[in-house]
Amino acid sequence: MGTDGRLLRGERTRTAVLDRALQLATTAGLDGLSLSQVADSLGVSKSGLFAHWRSKEELQLAVIAHARAQWTELVIGPALEAPRGVRRLWAVHNQRLDFYESKTLPGGCFFANAHFEFNARPGVVRDRLAVELRDWMGFLTSLATDAVALGDFRPGTDPAGIAYEAESLGVCAVMQAPVLGADVTFRHARRALFDHLRAVTTDPTILPEPT
């Protein structure tokens, strides 16, 4: 089967291909992603990739699912080790910024880029991205709701508002970092949410100063 057969054999290889496709999508755009582009990047034939994805749209949807799995593993998973409540909410925000700073993806944030790219393009890809955004905002809101229920936040604190602020700061930081500087933007994104969370907690000392 040659090089193509060895490269495209099994789930392990499929994951490697999606890793590369995800990286390319953050620089060339999800719409600019193609089977030919991925094949050229890996040094294999386009025909070999057809064994996994029969169209550009199938590849795009697979990349979205792969991006979600990566986000779950590298951002959500580690953050869930923090205690429930405001500390877990803070851990998710901090872990998110750590992920951006690690430059795992050369274009910064797959989901932020893809949402901007497809917001005005009705279709299957946009619909799938919308599901991802709703799920993510629901997750952040659930963390803030836990913090209210546990008594970490003052009565009357709006969980959805906290989630919106966290998301806004994360997106703003990753989009501005290439222009204004990563050190400045990520530091401001951490400090802004940290100060707000401390301002609405019943016990500000529950959150240690960010390092």
Image (spheres, grey):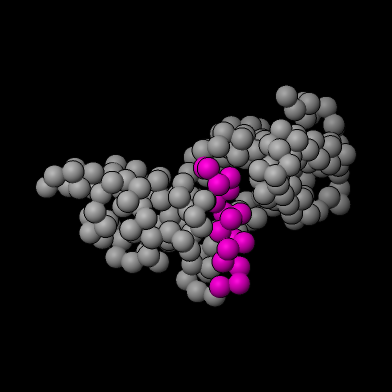
- x then y, percent, for residue 16: 34, 43
Q: Residue placed farthest to the left in the image?
A: 1
Query: How many numbered callouts?
Result: 0
Q: Which residue is drawn at the image coordinates 36% and 52% (left, top)?
A: 38
Using the image, determine if residue 138 lies above or below residue 194: below
Q: Which residue is drawn at the image coordinates 25% and 49% (left, top)?
A: 44
Using the image, determine if residue 209 lies above or below residue 61: above
Q: Residue placed farthest to the bottom in the image?
A: 122
Q: Nearer the viewer, residue 149 or 196?
A: 196
Q: Which residue is drawn at the image coordinates 56% and 66% (left, top)?
A: 118
Image quarter (top left, top right, bottom left or bottom right) of the C terminus: top right
Q: Is residue 144 visible?
A: no
Q: Is residue 122 left or right of residue 206?
A: left
Q: Is residue 64 left or right of residue 133?
A: left
- x then y, percent, for residue 82: 63, 32
Residue segment shown in magenta: 105-121
- x then y, percent, for residue 191: 79, 35
Using the image, determine if residue 77 lies above or below residue 17: above
- x then y, percent, for residue 210: 75, 27
Magenta stretch: includes residue 114: yes
Q: Nearer the viewer, residue 125 or 2?
A: 2
Q: Is residue 129 left or right of residue 152?
A: left
Q: Which residue is drawn at the image coordinates 46% and 46% (left, top)?
A: 23
